[in-house]
Amino acid sequence: MSMLPVFTVCRLPGKVSLLLMLGIFLTACSEPAMHHQASPAIPYTRLLAAEQVIVTRELPGRVSPFTLSEVRPQVNGVILERLFEEGADVVAGQVLYQIDPVLYEAAYKNAKAELGMALADENAARLRAERYTILVKSNAISKQDYDDAIAAYGVSRRGLKPPGKPLNQPG
């Protein structure tokens, strides 16, 4: 038994088939379009020359320095002026800031006054120790008073020795 292919015929509704037939008829009956001869195109010519061109590209990004140093004053006080530019090179010993000298002048005057008082105390203790040296030999004062006068003189002398540099030297 052999099988034959089965074709199904599809019927289109009347209006659709009418429109289809009308479209085929109209295209078949139309006149051929007139062909207009276009004027020949004039070619555009340009002389080319080799030249160097710099190609640049702007890309977004962030940069960070490979070394970073922070400049901070090592003394207390009010900064009146910064004497260097941000990002500029500085050298050792260069003055970087001007600091208000009022606090340091007051501290200097205070230290100078304390030195004057210590000198006066040392002089009075020295005179007392010298007098007591004579008086203790004649037993006019007790040995305890003499020892106290000598100790007070020693303390006042040690108070005059500066712990570091003298007042008139910086640093």
Image (cartoon, helix red, strand yellow):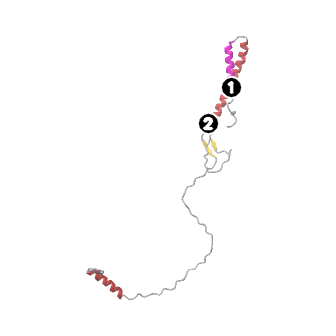
In the picture of the structure, the residue carrying the numbered disc 2 is: 103
13 is higher (above) or lower (below) than 129: below
- State which quarter of the image contains the N terminus: bottom left
Residue that sits furthest to the top in the current view: 139
Q: Determine the secondary structure under disc 1.
A: helix
Residue 70, x across and y down, in percent: 60, 46
Q: Quadrant of residue 166?
A: top right
Give, as a three-letter code, the residue at label 1: Arg
Give, as a three-letter code, the residue at label 2: Leu
- Residue at position x 70%, y 23% in the image: 123
- Residue at position x 71%, y 21% in the image: 126
Residues rendered magenta in the picture: 141-158
Residue 39, x across and y down, in percent: 50, 86
- State which quarter of the image contains the C terminus: top right
137 sits left or right of 29 in the view: right
Mark 2 residue crowding within 10 angstroms, few (<14) / some (14–19) / many (20+):
few
45 is higher (above) or lower (below) than 133: below
90 sits left or right of 42 in the view: right
Residue 156, x across and y down, in percent: 68, 24
Q: Earlier in the sequence, mark 1 or mark 2?
A: 2
Total marks shown come to: 2
Marker disc for residue 158: 1
32 sits left or right of 71 in the view: left
151 is higher (above) or lower (below) than 11: above
Q: Determine the secondary structure under disc 2.
A: helix
Q: Quadrant of residue 63?
A: bottom right
Residue 94, x across and y down, in percent: 67, 45
Asked if residue 134 can be seen in this view, the reply is yes
